[in-house]
Each structure stands twice: as C-alpha cells, then as structure tokens.
Image (cartoon, rainbow, N blue to C red):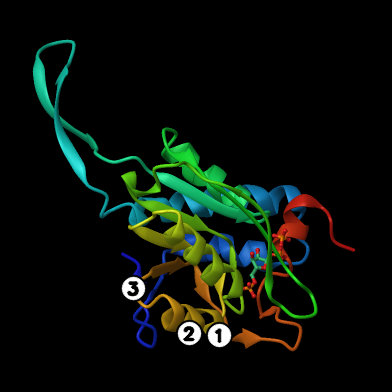
Amino acid sequence: MPRQHPEFPNLVVFDHPLIQHKVTLMRDRATSGQTFRALLIQIAGLMTFEVTRSFSTEFVMVETPLERAKGSRVAEKITICPVLRAGLAMAEGILELIPEARVGHLGMFRDEKTLKPVQYLLRLPKDLDAGPVVLVDPMLATGGSASEAIRMLREHGARDIRMICLVAAPEGVRRMLRDHPDLTIYAAALDRELNANGFILPGLGDAGDRLYGTGA
Ligand code: PRP
C-alpha cells in the first residue's frame, strides 16, 4: 500500500519496489527516450491500481457460460486529463487499464523566465462532473501548472479530482496544499528541492524533452 507522507497530508508516495526500481531507471541520464517512455507508461499503470481504489462500483448480473452470476462494474464515467506534453505518456499507461475512460487534454507549458504556466489547448468532455477526474503530469515542480490545471478542471465542472505525478518537489506539494487543500496527489517520489531554474533535484531532467527527443 502506498503511504501518506508524514509531512504533507495531501501527498501519497508509492514505495512499491517495482515503482522505485523503474523511477531509478528513469532518473538515469543514460536511459534512452524509448525506454524512458516505456517506463513512464508502466509506472502510470502500476499507480492506477491504487489511485482508482475508491472509485464507486455498481452491481450487475452476468451470464457465464454456465449460469447467471453476480458481478460489479465501475459505476461512473472516468476522465483522464494529461497536461501536455509529458502527461500524454502517463495517460497512455492509465488508458491501458481503463480503456473506456475519456481523455481531456490540457495544453500548458511553463514560461522559462517567469516559471508561470501558459495555456495553449483545452479540450475537455462536457460532463466532467459525471465521475472521477484524474489529472496526470509527471513533474510537479513549482506547482504552478498543476494548480492552474485544477482550477480549470473545477471551473469546467469537475468535482472529484485526484492527481498522479511521477516526481514531486516539496515546493509544488506545498503550493498545492495552499491552493487546493482537499486534493490528493499520488507520486512515485518526493524529491529534495527545486534549483534556481525551477528544475527538480535530483529529478530526471525535462520529462517532455526526454519523452519526445526535443532536448538539446
Ligand atoms: C513541465 C511539466 C509540468 C510543468 C511543471 O512541463 O511537465 O507540466 O513543467 O512545472 P511547474 O510545477 O513549475 O508548473 P513543460 O513546461 O516542460 O512542458 P512540456 O511537457 O511540453 O515539455
């Protein structure tokens, strides 16, 4: 079971050996973009198992080849909202487990000088209030992007939101606690700090660039 972080009531960190193993591979600068992407997809899938535990289910009957049996199915419409670009690979991993989920796209990048999020795309299902919404972005650095994303999702009707990230910085978790105290963040690692350029230390570099080969 992942554990709630002792210092941050809004943070759950996954201490599962497989997840920690894969995060370590992702941190390695020698890991190729192809492997980096595959690992992120796998970790997102592993995290999904716990993150969806509280989803409500409904009773159904099913015809087995032998007889009628009691069963259950997820009751509500699930929406996965990746923050572009880096969130796309994580969303893929979740979709493998919840193929019926809808996907809402949030296009945002962080201005390199001001570190403020700049939005360039918003494409959401109309009935965001029809079920749980999972915001996904591998990096929670200053928390500016995540905070703005949650604000937008709420403005568009989302009521039941949780966030999955890979690596979180204490600064970002603190910011989220201030801006959205009721939101639970699930992360694979809580890193040490941000550097002067707003990069997570030790981190894993720029996830978007490593995923899509756009780095220097
Ligand atoms: C990164 C990351 C988050 C954001 C985190 O995106 O994927 O969206 O920065 O920073 P914050 O917590 O300080 O807001 P980036 O701007 O690199 O865009 P990209 O995914 O398109 O590369």
Q: Nearer the viewer, residue 50 or 146?
A: 146
The local secondary structure at tag 1 comes to: helix
Q: Which residue is mark 3?
A: 182
Kindly tell me whether residue 29 is visible in this rendering: yes
**Residue 139 location (% of width, % of height):** 60, 68
Q: Amino acid at mark 2?
A: Arg
Residue under the point 82% across and 53% down: 213
Relative to 8, does residue 89 appear above or below in the rendering?
A: above
Q: Residues within 10 Å of mark 2 (few under 14, many from 20)?
A: some
Q: Residues within 10 Å of mark 3 (few under 14, many from 20)?
A: few
Q: Pick whichever, 139 or 45, lies toward us.
A: 139
Kindly tell me whether residue 166 is visible in this rendering.
no
Q: Which image quadrant: the C terminus?
A: bottom right
Instruction: Name the residue furthest top.
Output: 65
Q: Which residue is mark 2?
A: 174
Determine whether the residue tagged by mark 2 lies in a helix, strand or loop. Answer: helix
Q: CA distance from mark 1 to mark 2?
A: 5 Å
Kind of residue sitting beneath label 1: Glu
Residue 62 shown left or right of residue 187 in the figure: left
Q: Amino acid at mark 3?
A: Asp
Count of numbered labels shown in the rendering:
3
For label 1, the residue is 171
Above/below status of 88 relative to 68: below
Q: Is residue 185 left or right of residue 91?
A: left
Do labels 1 and 2 touch, CB within 8 Å?
Answer: yes
The residue positioned 54% from the left and 79% from the top of the image is: 172
